[in-house]
Image (cartoon, rainbow, N blue to C red):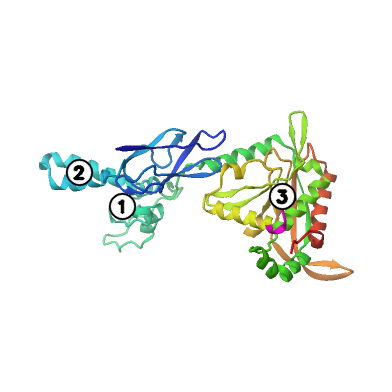
Amino acid sequence: MAVELKVPPLGESITEAVVGKWNKKQGESVSADEPLVVLETDKVTIDVPAPAAGSIASIAFKEGDKVRVGDVLGTIEAGGAGAGASPAVAAATPAPAQAAAPVSAAAAQAGADTRITPTAKKMAEENRVDVGQLKGSGTGGRIMKEDVQGQLNRPAAAPSAPPAPAAPSGPRPNAAREERVRMTPLRKRVAERLLQAQSNAALLTTFNEVDMGEVMALRKKYNDKFQAKHGVKLGFMSFFIRASVEALKAFPQINAEIDGEDVIFKHYYDIGVAVSGSRGLVVPVVRDADKLSLADLEKTVGDYGGRARNDKLTMADLTGGTFTITNGGIFGSMLSTPILNPPQTGILGMHNIVERPVARDGQVVIRPIMYIALTYDHRLVDGREAVQFLVRVKECIEDPERLLLDI
């Protein structure tokens, strides 16, 4: 009996997705609830499980195709061998030679299409690479772009004929050295929102520097006890979340949003924290951050980071947020101007910690310094409030004892 594999509900206001990856090929056996196909939306990726055990009888959409909620992605022959048994039956009862040729060619083409990604196929065709000689490194031996590139990078055999005349001067055709890849839904949505932020808000960025010496010493002194009690390491992000909450309480404009001719002041603190996912940065939201201890903040951010890397974040994790923090320092960034996450009016950028010479009590000393940046919507936030916000964050980080450690 054939069981349909349908596109499930994707989340509030999301009606379509892109087929990101099939984990199995037509004819292969599957187990019930086994992740069968990955769908990508502009927010999250979703694993669609097999509704029944059996074998894949048909695949209706290939990787890169757009699908809508309710579309039938394919069918599963429940409990049977499915398409996987067909080759054996065909081999047992061969057709006449003249009729077998076109059928064999079609089957070979279908097999080639399922064992090589579209990008790898295009690269192989443009460079005249015989994919039949390649060993795929993808799931189930599927040929990937890297496999074709590796073949192209192998040293060529010495030519027996005289070298060809030198190519004429001027621009060379670059088609064989270029690759066209469709933008993922997440990247497309990020691009739209960044453009929206720059078009619809009056963006301005102010900067300050923070001496990280005290908080680093505090971490070194208490980290072992903190980890023993709470089961998580004491990081920098929890300090900056708590410091930001304190600053947002003092300057509520930065925790507000503009709605037409009205200003909505948020008397709660849902802090978005940018984390690295498998497809780029995503911003899950730490709810009611003002009510969480440093240990709770570290656990929440760590959990979000792990789920982002494994594409396990949900729409609920990414929805809302009153203020955002992004840490470019983990990638080595010295200084940057972060862009707002609409409709928020503020975003704090953290950067790397570098030992720098600074003046202290008339003496030049070496201190671990981090530059911080606040980008804000100047329609609602004045420069005075923005500068004072960063000063408050700086004061909290440089005097961390004012932030409860909960040890």
Q: Residue 104, which numbered label? A: 2
Residue at which label 3 appears: 289
Type of the residue with mark 2: Ser
Residue at which label 1 appears: 131
Q: Main secondary structure of the magenta part?
A: helix
Q: Is residue 130 visible?
A: no
Quadrant assignment for the N terminus: top left
Q: Secondary structure at mark 1?
A: helix
Q: Is residue 378 visible?
A: yes
Specify start and end residues of the magenta stretch as a single range: 290-295
Q: Is residue 49 left or right of residue 238?
A: left
Kindly check if marks 2 and 3 are in contact, taking CB atoms under 8 A apart as contact.
no
Please name the residue shown 77% across and 28% down the image: 261
Q: Is residue 226 left or right of residue 310?
A: right
In the image, residue 184 lies at what x, y percent? 51, 43
Instruction: Answer few, some or many: residues within 10 Å of disc 2's Cα (few below 14, many 20 plus, some between 14 and 19).
Output: few
Type of the residue with mark 1: Val
Kindly check if marks 1 and 2 are in contact, taking CB atoms under 8 A apart as contact.
no
